[in-house]
Amino acid sequence: MGVVIIDGSTVRAFVTDDQQFTKSVDERFAALDLNNDGVLSRSELRKAFESLRLLESHFGVDVATPPDELTQLYNSIFERFDCDGSGTVDLQEFRSEMKKILLAIADGLGSCPIQMVLEDDDQSFLKKASDLEAAKLDPNHAQAS
């Protein structure tokens, strides 16, 4: 477990590093594509967001959100990702929306640093952004990660 400090520039640098960003997003997409059909279904994307527990907790405290409200929220997230209305999310749509989300996080953080406690095996995009910044500051870090 470790503590990292990031700000908006850390996240923005990760998103603008096309090679690292694309590799990370493509790996996440492949992990979410449970049936390996090359697209994400509504249920596959919902499982991904459920695992993040963004909607079921508030600053780490569980909140009871009615199931109908959760379904509406997850459906609206899916519709946001499904840009062409095909009923599935392809890799390009996923990349595009993840870029928008991460850039919004970068804008929200601005130049205000935050501390995050992360597991060593954490594969979140924010951890990857932190690792990329550390590798640029210390080339030996890239070999250790």
Image: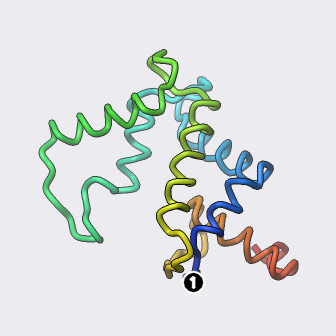
Residue 113 falls left or right of residue 63? right
Tell me the quarter of the picture where residue 45 sits.
top left
Residue 24 falls left or right of residue 112? right
Q: Is residue 108 above or below residue 116?
A: above
Q: Nearer the viewer, residue 40 or 99?
A: 99
- Determine the residue positioned at 55% across, 62% down: 106
Q: Position of residue 20 (x, y in %)?
A: 76, 54
Q: Nearer the viewer, residue 84 or 40?
A: 84
Density class for disc 1 (Cα within 10 Å; few <14, some 14-19, many ≥20) is few
Tell me the quarter of the picture where residue 93 sits.
top right
- Determine the residue positioned at 55% across, 54% down: 102
Q: Position of residue 10 (x, y in %)?
A: 65, 69
**Identity, as a three-letter code, of the amino acid under mark 1:** Gly
Residue 87 falls left or right of residue 16? left
Residue 139 falls left or right of residue 100? right
Q: Is residue 89 above or below residue 117?
A: above
Q: Position of residue 145 (x, y in %)?
A: 75, 73
- Determine the residue positioned at 47% across, 63% down: 108
- Determine the residue positioned at 56% across, 75% down: 111
Q: Position of residue 82 (x, y in %)?
A: 48, 26
Q: Which residue is mark 1?
A: 2
